[in-house]
Image (spheres, rainbow, N blue to C red):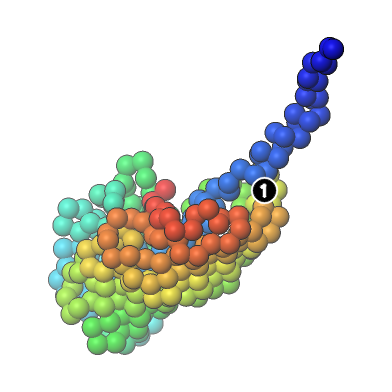
Amino acid sequence: MRVAPPMPMSRGWSLLFIAVAIGCAPPDAKDVVHPLEGTLGTAVPAAFVSAVAMSALGGTTSPCATVVTPPGAAGQQVQVDVHLGPGCPMPFDGERDGTLVVTGMWTPQLATFVSDFTQVEQGDRELLVLKIAVMTVVPRDTHLLISYAQQDVETRTDGSNSAQLQQTAWVVDVDTRGTPDPTDDILTVSGGDQSLFAMAGARSQGDVTQVAVGNAVFHARCRRNPSEGIAAVQRAGTAGGGMLLFTFHSTCDGRADVTGALSPYGLMLGKSVPLDFLQ
């Protein structure tokens, strides 16, 4: 009795299996982690320049700052140049040289600042934030309460020709601990974000990304990751959805723990992911 040889797989079935395998490939977690990096990567430099500028304008001598235009008559704009270097390092790894320019209106009770981060030199890596158009700073005892809207923040994007429509507010509580040294400050970041991105490029997509941060605390001398608090990032749209819930741990290792995940990020549950505040 002759046994028929196995039939070769048709080209159509081969293509189907390849398509299924591609469709089942895990999504790139960077798509959902990067919005959190952008949020925290803006809050920390905002706190740094605000604390240095407020201290210098209040008359405290600082190795970091030069008051270019001091406070004068009511309504007069001030300018503070924050000089980076060995005695005044930026909080993130890699920044070594450059000048951050802070301008705006100042009184001892209230300040409104514009901050430019584009003149920082740090080799081949750059800050995610470029400029904050409006920051309100309110001193309270040894604390500074800094608030800004996301639509006033200009950041670097991974894609070109991108448009952002962002409606959110962020608050950073800076505990200066009564010293002019920004490296011993304790920062607490809170707020929420909803962004509609319309990107033109090789692949057309429209996505809604929501970021919420609850009491993310950066302790003194650690800016690689918050040491307390939670955050959530949710995506929805033509490029797919998903959600990750992060908690932050006390180890200063530049990572966050995934303690909640919805499809297609379910396999990340229980893992830790790196946080990178430079690009």
Side of 28 where 241 appears, left or right: right
Asked if residue 107 can be seen in this view, the reply is no
Above or below for 226 versus 159: below
Residue 210, position as x, y percentages in the image: 57, 67
Above or below for 153 versus 128: below
Label 1 CA crowd tier, 10 Å (few <14, some 14–19, many 20+) = some
Looking at the picture, tell me which residue is in the foreground, 44 or 136. Answer: 44
Q: Residue furthest front?
A: 1
Residue 252, position as x, y percentages in the image: 27, 59
Above or below for 196 versus 73: above
Q: Secondary structure at mark 1?
A: loop
Residue 160, position as x, y percentages in the image: 58, 46
> Which residue is painted at 49% across and 54% down in the image?
268
Residue 38, position as x, y percentages in the image: 46, 59
Residue that numbered label 1 is attached to: 200
Asked if residue 230 can be seen in this view, the reply is yes
Looking at the picture, tell me which residue is in the foreground, 155 or 215. Answer: 215
Q: Residue furthest top?
A: 2
Side of 207 where 118 appears, left or right: left
> Which residue is painted at 29% across and 87% down in the image?
140
Looking at the picture, tell me which residue is in the foreground, 212 or 148. Answer: 212
> Which residue is painted at 16% across and 75% down in the image?
179
**Amino acid beneath label 1:** Ala
Number of disc labels: 1
Q: Quadrant of the N terminus?
A: top right
> Which residue is painted at 41% across and 67% down in the image?
247
Looking at the picture, tell me which residue is in the foreground, 268 or 56. Answer: 268
